[in-house]
């Protein structure tokens, strides 16, 4: 009996032991749906991926300049169609297995496989043969990815992609361990199975409680990783996040409640900046009544976006009728549908719902987040006031919200797109007919054709002339998307809002909202 009691006490001691101390505690926006980079879709998941994995390149957290990652160097052919990456010698996975060029080739083909659930496979469609393979019309061996020995990856493109170096750093294109995936299948991301190659390892994942990351001793540049252990708390409510920050339990958070923004303006630990991003409403065009473009236009014209940006979000957000933000070199965004309440009512009547009569029940899906809840309520009231229709509000937690969007199980849903690279294509490609990020059911052969023409230089066309023609075609495509198709309603351009504890060093704000944990350090209290 004494031995049993002693054993029980020992087990209780281990079970009740406090977690190992972390150098930095971070309030994370949501519980990740997955730790598989190829299946990720959200920025919050991408931050974790960038800590666990590293691609051919990485981006400077201040300037977004392309820096060497797993690849120590690369060169681009004069015609811009062939990129050759030279991998570093001696790079290994966290279990000591050598990381080779074939790992990248296999990881990217995995995204492009016809049966792959990856939403971002289209990022590789400029690789020769990639689009045909994804559609089931070509073979993997015909895709322009070649591993020439263990350390050289050769990529053949169908057209010049000047931003491909930045694209190679994006979380979807991070390498994944073939040997672990083939051994464990979908369970390869479990703590006991996962194999990574980035600055950190997964030490612990307590679902909906915390994720702990530990410095990876096998990372090729481990000397630049200052923090030994990171603790990420998946907290959806920004009020809860902020309260934990104020009590010193959290050092860094990525979401600040809108109602208190005015009180934070002069605090040095409140950090904000512009984003290459657009928030919008998606409309499910496969489901009545939004299968009628007149209804979609009516819902677009009824919104007062100045109220949304200025009185609801209140963080410097700019109202917009365009999908692509301003500021990209050489591009002037196309105007979408500006507010016009009289025309909104007319279009709804033309669609068969005069004064809202006979309009079927519809719901607006949103994340269980106070800011989105406030925005949803404003839109609900606006549609009732202007169109005399009732819109039910439907709040879901992150995983269900994402799943519902992917399955087109919604009527209206809040969405946002955060640019992956500084080019209009990062926004416009989302709404191609075959894009996994479309999530509206809208398909337009004209839209796809315009983007295809923009992507392809004409015979004998100079690079300068192609760049000019490309931007004009992009603008025509954006105008068609927003004024003819209307599968989405742009609302505003978000800003970044961070709270950063004074002891944190190395934090930088950039247009892509990237946060590299490996670049951070802390100043210990004296």
Image: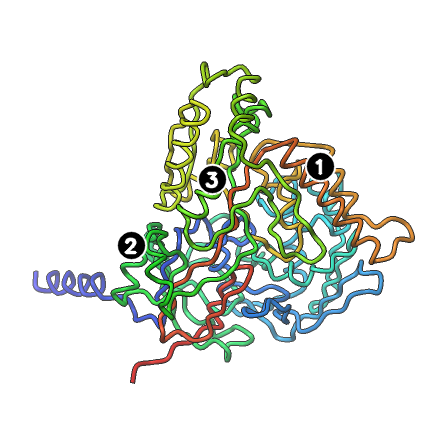
Q: Is 71 or 394 nearer to us in this picture?
A: 394
Neighbor class of circle 3 (other Cα within 10 Å; few <14, some 14-19, many 20+) is: many
Lower sequence index among marks 2 and 1 = 2
Left or right, residue 395 beside residue 431: left
At mark 1, the secondary structure is helix
What is the distance, in whole Å, between disc 1 and disc 3 at their CAs?
A: 23 Å
Q: Relative to 215, does residue 11 appear above or below in the rendering?
A: above
Residue drawn at x 14%, y 63% is 9
Residue drawn at x 65%, y 45% is 428
Q: Which residue is mark 1?
A: 447
Lower sequence index among marks 1 and 3 = 3
For the N terminus, the image quarter is: bottom left
Q: Which residue is mark 2?
A: 240
Lower sequence index among marks 3 and 2 = 2
Q: Do the residues under discs 2 and 1 have CB atoms within 8 angstroms? A: no
What is the distance, in whole Å, between disc 2 and disc 1 at their CAs?
A: 43 Å
Query: Residue 329: which quarter of the image?
Result: bottom right
Neighbor class of circle 1 (other Cα within 10 Å; few <14, some 14-19, many 20+) is: many
Label of residue 414 in the image: 3
């Amino acid at each position: 009996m004494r031995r049993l009691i002693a054993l029980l006490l020992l087990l209780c001691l281990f079970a009740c032991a406090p977690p190992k101390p972390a150098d930095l505690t971070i309030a994370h926006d949501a519980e990740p749906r997955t730790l598989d980079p190829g299946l990720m879709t959200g920025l919050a998941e991408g931050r974790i991926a960038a800590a666990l994995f590293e691609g051919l390149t990485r981006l400077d957290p201040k300037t977004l300049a392309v820096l060497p990652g797993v690849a120590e160097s690369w060169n681009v052919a004069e015609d811009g169609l062939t990129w050759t990456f030279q991998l570093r010698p001696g790079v290994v996975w966290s279990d000591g297995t050598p990381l080779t060029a074939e790992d990248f080739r296999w990881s990217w083909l995995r995204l492009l496989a016809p049966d792959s659930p990856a939403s971002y496979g289209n990022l590789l469609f400029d690789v020769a043969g990639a689009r045909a393979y994804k559609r089931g019309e070509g073979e993997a061996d015909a895709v322009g990815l070649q591993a020439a020995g263990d350390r050289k990856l050769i990529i053949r493109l169908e057209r010049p992609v000047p931003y491909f170096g930045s694209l190679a750093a994006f979380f979807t294109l991070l390498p994944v361990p073939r040997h672990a995936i083939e051994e464990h299948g979908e369970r390869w991301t479990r703590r006991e199975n996962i194999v990574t190659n980035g600055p950190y390892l997964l030490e612990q994942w307590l679902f909906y409680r915390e994720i702990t990351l530990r410095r990876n001793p096998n990372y090729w540049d481990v000397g630049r990783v200052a923090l030994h252990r990171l603790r990420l708390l998946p907290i959806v409510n920004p009020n809860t996040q902020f309260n934990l920050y104020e009590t010193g339990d959290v050092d860094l958070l990525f979401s600040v409640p809108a109602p208190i923004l005015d009180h934070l303006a002069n605090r040095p630990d409140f950090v904000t900046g512009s984003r290459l991003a657009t928030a919008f409403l998606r409309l499910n065009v496969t489901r009545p009544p939004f299968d009628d473009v007149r209804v979609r236009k009516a819902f677009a014209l009824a919104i007062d976006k100045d109220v949304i940006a200025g009185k609801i979000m209140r963080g410097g957000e700019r109202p917009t009728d365009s999908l692509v933000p301003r500021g990209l070199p050489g591009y002037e965004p196309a105007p979408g549908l500006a507010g016009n309440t009289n025309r909104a009512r007319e279009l709804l009547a033309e669609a068969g719902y005069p004064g809202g009569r006979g309009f079927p029940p519809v719901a607006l899906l949103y994340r269980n987040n106070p800011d989105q809840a406030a925005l949803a309520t404003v839109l609900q009231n606006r549609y009732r006031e202007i169109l005399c229709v009732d819109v039910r509000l439907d709040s879901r937690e992150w995983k269900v919200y994402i799943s519902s969007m992917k399955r087109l199980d919604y009527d209206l849903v809040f969405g946002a797109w955060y640019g992956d690279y500084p080019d209009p294509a990062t926004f416009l490609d989302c709404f191609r007919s075959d894009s996994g990020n479309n999530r509206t059911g809208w398909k337009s052969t004209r839209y796809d054709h315009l983007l295809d023409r923009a992507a392809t230089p004409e015979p004998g066309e100079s690079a300068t002339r192609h760049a000019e023609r490309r931007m004009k075609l992009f603008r025509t495509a954006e105008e068609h998307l927003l004024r003819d198709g209307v599968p989405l309603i742009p609302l505003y351009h978000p800003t970044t809002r961070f709270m950063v504890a004074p002891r944190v060093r190395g934090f930088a704000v950039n247009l892509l909202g990237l946060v590299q944990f490996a670049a951070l350090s802390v100043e210990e209290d004296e």
